Amino acid sequence: MGKKGKNRNGIVFSTNPDFEYQYDQGDDQELLSPAQQKLRVTLDKKQRRGKEVTLITGFVGPDEDLKDLGKLIKTKCGVGGSAKDGEIIIQGDQRSKVLAYLLAEGYKNTKQSGG
């Protein structure tokens, strides 16, 4: 059995015949409106063989909405990237384009952090 199955909150075995496992409900996060999102746009080079990427963190919502936003930003900048684990990675130093796009789309609490 892999880890992709149901999570039983650390319980492996019970001798109680009436015991019912309580399963985790997963990542059902509610999507905040763009005005409530607090996004950070940074430049990152760590563990990327010296290549620069623009990193967008702080998104609160389901993974589908994160991937949709990532796709829109990648299209707007004309570069590749990915959206997973609550962050969006855009290839290259695209901080100014990403920041301008997010502010235009209504993400008012978006800020550039770092250098």
Image (cartoon, helix red, strand yellow):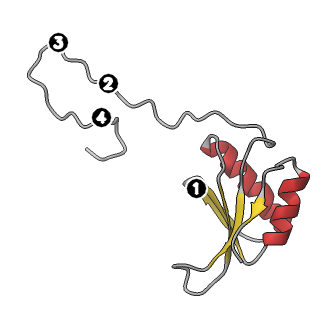
Per the image, the residue denoted by label 3 is: 18
Q: Is residue 53 visible?
A: yes
Q: Residues within 10 Å of mark 3 (few under 14, many from 20)?
A: few
Rendering coords of residue 4 (x, y %) = 37, 44
**Residue under the image location 71 percent in, 67 percent down:** 113
Real-space Cα separation, disc 2 to disc 3, in angstroms: 13 Å
Rendering coords of residue 5 (x, y %) = 34, 39
**Residue under the image location 55 percent in, 79 percent down:** 46
Per the image, the residue denoted by label 1 is: 84
Per the image, the residue denoted by label 4 is: 9
Q: Quadrant of the N terminus?
A: top left
Q: Is residue 98 left or right of residue 59?
A: right
**Residue under the image location 84 percent in, 49 percent down:** 108
Choose mark 4 or mark 3, whichever is in front. Answer: 4
Real-space Cα separation, disc 3 to disc 1, in angstroms: 39 Å
Q: Residues within 10 Å of mark 4 (few under 14, many from 20)?
A: few
Real-space Cα separation, disc 2 to disc 4, in angstroms: 7 Å
- Disc 2 marks a residue whose amino acid type is Gln
